Image: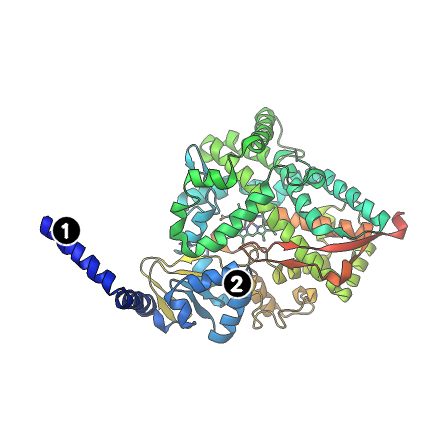
Amino acid sequence: MYFNMAGLAQVVLTLYDYWFTVLPSTLLVYFLFQRYRHGLNRIPGPVIRSISPIPRIVSVLKGRSHEDDIRLHQKYGKIVRIAPNSFSISDPAEINQLYGLGTKFLKSPFYELSEAQDEEGIIPDTFIINDKELHTRMKKNAANAYSMNGLVQMEPLVEPVTERLVKKLEEYAVNGNAVDIGDMIANYTMDAVFALTFARDFDYMSHGDVLGIHRVMKVASWYMAVFGQIAWTHKFLLANPVVAGWVFGDGGQSQADMMAVANTEVQKGRNRVSEDGPMTFLQRLILNQRANPKSINDREVLAHAFGNITAGSDTTATAIRGILYHLLKTPEAYQKLVEEIRSANLALPVGFAEANRIEYLGAVIKEGMRLHPSVGMMLGRTVPSEGAVICGYKLPGGAEVGLNPWILHRNPAVFPNPDKFWPERWLSSVTSEEQLRLMNRSFLTFGHGAHTCSGRWISTMETTKLLPTLLRYYDMELDDGGRTYRFENFWFTMQKGLKVRLRKRVDLL
Ligand code: HEM
């Protein structure tokens, strides 16, 4: 033992004496290992990206990694090694292999960074669950709440929130001042998703971020985007409840207020006798539980309900802001949509079914969501243990791969002239059936396959109702040509500074 300790000390001292040789050679061996293991050096990409995750982290930290990734794909092709173990794909032909219903590619460790914990441990959230059985059961037990029929029952709950927004905007239409409609939309979508889930909201539109959810989401998405590049660090950071408590606080009064609202709604669901008439998301789940108690437990009911708030507010606001910005920037499209909406003579506030019949409105919404997807980083998946061939290259089990909606949506082979906001591209009178099929298959705003966004139709309903409501009431234009509008990409691509000027329509005065 004495001999070993002395020998070890001698080795350390020698290394210390020769650190200027030892350090560079160790780093060199590490870099070479990273670059060449499993023959990954054959996969196109900058050498610097293949030896260390740091260049990728720097790119993400700038909040514009989608721009770097587009340049990399333009230079290197359909598959790019963006970090030593991470591969970005831009070929729609690979969507099915990675995300299709029977895929063996599970969510990559990147997603673990969005785990939330309660006293019982990690809260079951379909967004991160890799256990297929649990994921399927959870999706199934809430499917009717997220379905079109479920939406019809929830729609009336959103009307008062829409009316409140119109009333708030009225003030600006009267005084002629520019309004940051982007901030208002963020608060609108928060109130709307609370209303349809719990039949109560916290009037974010009047009081701002009273529950602190916008702040938590901003910090959490920054953390996920940056530290998700080195996901192994998570267990030392926010996976540790002490660190998480220090960063986010314990939820305090806000959590108590939200639980009180949830408990009231659960009780209403339990007392409900009929399945007809307006019904909240939470009541729908309670009825599902009553019909089949084994299909969903109390913790899962609440996980779905609170998941709606975190997954469904900022994402929808980002989509609506993106659509509105591009629409106001493109006078021909704005004019055409306004004419179609006004000639449809829709009742106010606009109903989903009526608005959904306006084909050009659907095209505008889809085009806005294509050009500005609310998620701007790749939807990462892990290559299964036996490895896989992707874009003609063999990748080893454990590698991270994914398609980024932002990149695929700017692929000119799928969307000709991809940077142009051109809603007509989605009309069957303009684009061939075959091309439309490819475009629809490549539309990744809501993901694809088993993990497709559960709330897709909820956000579609909110957007489809809100846009024509605004355009029925007001003429709108960007303040200062939209110069204050900007956004950063930290997983979510949330914008700031969407300022508009409003004029109330003459026939409504
Ligand atoms: C325009 C608005 C929205 C966008 C762009 C969006 C986007 C996405 C995307 C891209 C995914 C898939 C992530 C992946 O595969 O890795 C996803 C999943 C999910 N979204 Fe959304 N979302 C939106 C609104 C909503 C709303 C309103 C809700 C709920 C009320 C919601 C709930 C969920 C849930 C629960 C998942 C996880 C589904 C699963 O993994 O099985 N989302 N969303």
On screen, residue 274 above or below 226: above
Decide if residue 212 is in sight here.
yes
| Sequence order check, earlier mark of 1 and 2 | 1
Residue wearing tag 1: 5
The image position of residue 284, as x and y in percent, is: 58, 35
Res 386 quadrant in image: bottom left
Q: What is the secondary structure assignment of the residue under circle 2?
A: helix
Q: Is residue 473 left or right of residue 498?
A: right
Residue type for callout 1: Met
Residue at 38% in and 52% down: 232
Q: Secondary structure at mark 1?
A: helix
Residue 117 appears at what percent x and percent y?
45, 38
Ligand 1 contact, mark 2 (Cβ < 8 Å): no
Q: Is residue 219 left or right of residue 508?
A: left
- Nearer-the-camera pick, 168 or 15: 15
What residue sits 53% from the left and 50% below the top? 221
Q: How many marks?
A: 2
Query: Label 2: which residue?
Result: 65
- Residue 462 in percent (x, y) is at 67, 47
Q: Amino acid at mark 2?
A: Ser
Observer-nearest of 382 and 15: 15
| Mark 1 burial class by Cα count in 10 Å: few <14, some 14-19, many 20+ | few
